[in-house]
Amino acid sequence: DDKSYTVLLDVGGDDAGAAALGQFSAIIKSAGDYRHFYVFNARRPLTQTPQQAVDILREIERASRIPADALVNNTNLAIETDADVIGDSAAYARAVSSISGLPLAFTCVREGLEPPCCGEILPVQIFVNAPWNESPQNIE
């Protein structure tokens, strides 16, 4: 309710997480100043095809009762992500956009990587070190 804040909600990658958001859908939509980004990763088991990614998007929209208005390509393999992984995801992202009818807002890319293409880039830092990694990555 406090309009002096910008709030970012990560409700998970499926309809179960989005259902919790659904209880606030009327408030969010009436405010009229929200953005609903659908974030996808082409390297996840449930979104191996663009159609699967759009199917999950539609499940999330139904559960949250808030339509998405843009896409975010967050294709990655954690610390094993290289420029080729990101570059290879460009065609997948275009297909998700085409099937869903939503624009691609940006592609997340770990700082220091320079993919061959991908449109608008959002540089990100990794602050988490998974237990199976031998050395921390970008932990500050």
Image (cartoon, rainbow, N blue to C red):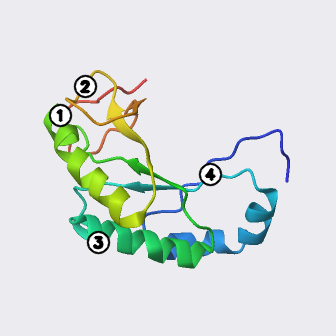
| Up-down relation of residue 112 to residue 52 (above or below) | above
Numbered disc 4: secondary structure:
loop
- Quadrant of the rendered structure where residue 63 is? bottom right
Q: Position of residue 80 (x, y in %)?
A: 17, 39
Numbered disc 2: secondary structure:
loop
- In the shown orientation, is residue 63 left or right of residue 105? right
Residue type at mark 1 is Asp
Numbered disc 1: secondary structure:
loop
Q: Crowding near pointer 4: few (<14 within 10 Å), some, many (20+)?
A: some
The reply to whether callout 3 and callout 2 are in contact (CB within 8 Å) is no
Q: Pointer 3: what residue? A: 52
The span from disc 1 to disc 3 (Cα, nearest Å) is 24 Å
Residue type at mark 4 is Arg
The reply to whether callout 2 and callout 1 are in contact (CB within 8 Å) is yes
| Camera-nearest residue between 55 and 99 | 99
Q: Pointer 1: what residue? A: 82
| Camera-nearest residue between 54 and 64 | 54
The span from disc 3 to disc 2 (Cα, nearest Å) is 27 Å
Q: Which of marks 1 and 4 is nearer the N terminus?
A: 4
Q: Crowding near pointer 2: few (<14 within 10 Å), some, many (20+)?
A: few
Q: Please give the label number shown on residue 35.
A: 4
The span from disc 2 to disc 1 (Cα, nearest Å) is 7 Å
